[in-house]
Image (cartoon, rainbow, N blue to C red):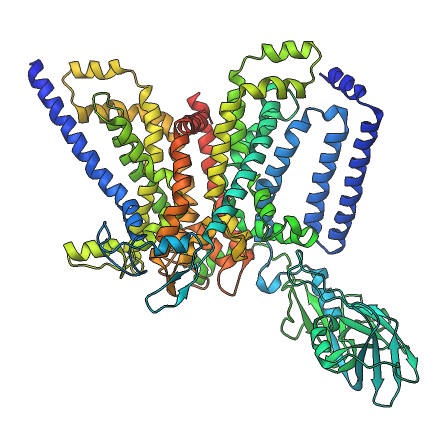
Amino acid sequence: MAMVESQSVIYRKLAAHVFLWFFLALIIFPLLMVIAISFRTGNFAVGDIIPSNPTLDHWRLALGMSIIDESGRTIPPPFPVLLWLWNSVKVAVISAILIVALSTTCAYAFARLRFSGRSLLLKAMLIFQMFPAVLALVAYYALFSRITEYFPPLGLNTHPGLIFAYLGGIALHVWTIKGYFETIDKSLEESAMLDGASPWQAFRLILLPLSVPILAVVFILAFITAITEYPVASILLQDEAKLTLAVGSQYYLNPQEYKWGDFAAAAVMSGLPITLVFLLAQRWLVGGLTAGGVKG
Amino acid sequence: MAVTTVSIEGAGTSATHWLKWAVLGLIALINLYAVTLMYIQGETVFALVFLILVATGLYVFAAERAYVHRYIFPGVATMFIFIVFPLAYTIWIAFTNFSASNILTFERARHYHLSQTYRIEGQNYDFSLYAAGPETYRLALTAKTGERFISEPVELRIPDAKAQPPAATAPIEIDLTAIDTPPDQPPLAVKELVRLRGVMQNVVAHLPDHSDLRMSGMRQFSATRPLFQVLPSAQGGDGSILVNQQTKERIAPDMRLGFYRQINAEGEFTGPGIAPGFSVFVGWKNFLRVLTDPGVQGPFLQIFGWTLTFSFLSVVFTLAIGTVLASLVQWEGLAGRGLYRLLLILPYAVPAFISILVFRGLFNQNFGEINLLLSQVFGIRPGWFNDPTLARTMLLIVNTWLGYPYMMILCMGLLKAIPADLYEASAMDGSNFIRDFFSITLPILMKPLTPLLIASFAFNFNNFVLVQLLTQGRPDIIGAQTPAGTTDLLVTYTYRIAFEGSGQDYGLASAIATLIFIMVGILALINIKLMRVDR
């Protein structure tokens, strides 16, 4: 009896492995393909997964170097990918830092201090974060064109303006950090307050050092959200030199000037670091995601 | 707590105390100026919002009573500016005719008309410039009759083209006085005049007889006069009627259409609208267009139906794949679970804007690797981007690829919470793997998953990035009045109405966005209800 069952378990395991590998092959195919394409000659070439005639031309262009084609012409890089990547990283890092700062102070007040309108604000935040910015793009555009008239450094076509716009999305982070603060014992802060510490000192010197893990999670989440954000950036940024990667990448696949190979190299080059950040951080992120989602 | 605060504040030196009030006062003054400026230009909404924000901010940071609110003010204020205000403003725009042709406020449109000028025939003057220092010149004009005029030295700086912000193009007012003989130095060469052309176009020269001259050619200034003037009240004007000085026609603002139009002697509108228009309230007109105008209603309903189908199917597919994979990966006996987990999460880790574009290339009809494979195996080359059904299928395939890891992650967390003895008990009853999945795993998962599924439905309902980067809504619906496509979701449809093509009908786009708000709002409320029940 026991013998038969273990036999069926073995078959089941084998079936599971076969199914998973088949499924993975299907899922990973596009990613492997794009790596292969980045080493193929030309922008229209078709071929196998392992290119028969590998070239580094697409990678040189992606890294901002000019190349010389067979007829001896110099081909400059089609787009400033490295600059776009830098813009993206800059916007994402600064907005993530500011988001962490804004949402921790908010979360502290919601978790520890009592004030009028507290539960109303908490509920309102939960409802409003369901409305994505993409629904109000017209209003965003109108808002930023007004700002441009009165204070251009924060207006349309500027990175500070884009960072400023990203600061609106802190509701979920406030909830996450608030949940974490509530798991930390209050007694330490209370005794510090008895010794004459102000709420600000209790927050900065006692609560914050205990909350580094959740701040890291929120930072990475905010960073990834900002670096992959497309709609708002596509409305606010106009100059080619100011675009973020998410907005700029699509210009490679313009039907009039289809640069499939160049796109592949740029995509692998810029997508790899972001993917690695995500994979390294995923253990904590997954916890944060499910906690934030389930707790709500 | 209040006591502690006061003691801390008191401990600070009086210098920092003064500094705080000085900074707050300065901020108040600067912002009061900005608010007044906005109000004068007719931006009532923005002036009001700005005023409320700054006043609240100042109160919160000045008053001891609001100490606690200092912690939440910055965060809540940014949420207000970038979430609440855009929502409210979108609803406001939905009731106006705000569009590319009616983009100005009434005050600005009026100002535009009043600043139009026309050239008076025959009153031309030759001009020359005389250098009078670095970037400083004297302007000299000579009439056909031989009369001469000259100005004091004025600075004519060529604006820096790269300046951020772009240099203002305010008119440069120059007063001239009569003289008898030209200055005793050679005038600037033509080459120099060409260089200064840009600045010279902003110059308004005032002659002693109060006529205004503007540059009208490379060597010429001409007398200009305002094209429109307000009809004086003595002639029956109420301040809103303008008179064309060239033709003597009268125009008045039509507050229903948002344009100045020609009026007849009885004050009735006769002519077409004169550009630029201004935005006015049009009531429910935009909503009525969505619901009744066949050129808008047809595409709207079609797109609405597809949006619902797309969101529902996306949730079903990702959930199905996600739960199955989660149960497999959580299976204790399976070797290499960690590796599987990592590889299965990959589609979620790659930035969506990159993977969507990768699929756009792979699905390309002629050069795409997917069609290459299909033509080698089955001998077919489907036109993924030209056929509506295929394009929709492609969207669903790509969205399932993008979305199943999220469902898998959620389910993995929830599966851990299911007690193992449930499975042991069912194994005693002779149940099998598949029956366990449908009779234990799925029912237990569904309850905590429901709010997340609704959130996922709402996310896909507004999945702008996928459609915008993959198909841009194409192939287009034939016979639609506004840009509309068979793969458009409601969000991309509003985006195209607002930002694509020549119409740029922000009012109509906002009306549709307002309808989406209502739907998303209903979903949000259901979700909050469900979560409360869950507790």
Question: Would you say residue B307 is visible in this rendering?
Answer: no
Quadrant position of the C terminus of chain B in the picture? top left
Residue B171 sits above or below residue B128 on the image: above
Decide which of A122, B211 is in the foreground and name it.
B211
Residue A107 is left or right of residue A52, and the answer is right
Residue B173 is left or right of residue A273, and the answer is right
The picture quadrant where one finds residue B3 is: top right
The picture quadrant where one finds residue B455 is: top left
The residue positioned 13% from the left and 17% from the top of the image is B430
The residue positioned 90% from the left and 78% from the top of the image is B209
Decide which of B446, B398 is in the foreground and name it.
B398
Q: Please tell me how many numbered marks the rendered image carries.
A: 0
Residue A155 sits above or below residue B533 on the image: below
Decide which of A97, B204 is in the foreground and name it.
A97
The picture quadrant where one finds residue B262 is: bottom right
| Residue A129 rendering spot, x and y as whole percentages | 51, 36
Quadrant position of the N terminus of chain B in the picture? top right
Decide which of B397, B173 is in the foreground and name it.
B173
| Residue B343 rendering spot, x and y as whole percentages | 29, 35
- In this view, the residue farthest toward the bottom is B145
| Residue B517 rendering spot, x and y as whole percentages | 50, 44
Residue B241 sits above or below residue A190 on the image: below
The residue positioned 32% from the left and 46% from the top of the image is B398
Residue B131 is left or right of residue B523, and the answer is right
| Residue B280 rendering spot, x and y as whole percentages | 64, 58
Question: Would you say residue B276 is visible in this rendering?
Answer: yes
